[in-house]
Image (cartoon, helix red, strand yellow):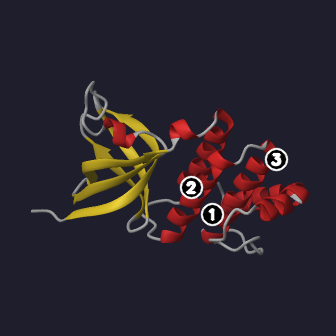
Amino acid sequence: MRHKYATAAFVLARTPFGEASAFIHLLTPDLGLLRARAQSVRKPGAKLASALQTFSETDVILVRGKDGWRLSGAVLVRSWFPELSKPARLRAGRTAGLLLRLLHGESVDPIFFAIFSQFLTVLPHIHDAAQEDAAECLAALRILHAAGVDAGEIPGGLEGAYTPDLLQELTNDRSEYILRINRSIVASGL
């Protein structure tokens, strides 16, 4: 019998597989970023479908098989998708895409889960486009720094809160931070 792993997770993306299955890209604090197969999740009335939507915070049960991870259970904790405005969803999507591009294989580092969690938590409470942009820049800087492709100082630290003063500081120096993010992405070879 295979060991089951229970952990919290964010659903970053879904990729269709076969007729009714999908690969779910999960960001977990315990197992890092991984891709798990969810059988029949795309069928109408599938039990796990609601818990495995993009930007869902979910408690999952995973089984490691010879062909990779398989989802054997999922319980929805919170669906972030309806709480985010369309521009905020695009920002969350770009941040999730950055994580998927940077982290290959199973990178077990809980800092990425913490960074994404804080970013999603603050995003629905920001109602100014410049502040949303600053929050996205800060999340990208934190992810790049944690991945080891940015050596500069991170405003507020890796796990600091997204305070209005901090976001204003990033807004004031936006072009400098955007340039730094782009240089880090180029240096990473993405």
Query: What residue is pinned by disc 2?
Result: 99
Kind of element beneath mark 2 = helix
Extreme residue toward the top, this view: 44
Q: Is residue 174 left or right of residue 94?
A: right
Q: Name which residue type carries label 3.
A: Ala
Residue in the image at 53% along x and 65% along y: 114
Q: CA distance from mark 1 to mark 3?
A: 20 Å
Left or right: 108, with 46 as reference point: right
**The quarter of the displayed image where residue 94 is located:** top right
Q: Quadrant of residue 42?
A: top left
Residue assigned mark 1: 143
Give the amino acid at mark 1.
Ile
Q: Pointer 3 and pointer 2: residues touching (CB < 8 Å)?
A: no
Total label count? 3
Farthest residue to the left: give it: 1
Q: Which residue, given by chain and number where applicable, does mark 3 sit on?
A: 130
The C terminus is located in which quarter?
A: bottom right
Q: Position of residue 81 (x, y in %)?
A: 52, 39
Q: How far apart are labels 3 and 2 at the CA level? A: 22 Å
Residue 34 location (% of width, % of height) = 40, 57
Q: Helix, strand, or loop for circle 1?
A: helix
Disc 1 and disc 3 in contact, CB within 8 angstroms: no
Q: CA distance from mark 2 to mark 1?
A: 7 Å
Graded by Cα atoms within 10 Å as few (under 14), some (14 to 19) or many (20 or more), the crowding at tag 3 reads: some
Q: Is residue 176 above or below residue 56?
A: below
- Who comes first in sequence, dot 3 or dot 2? 2
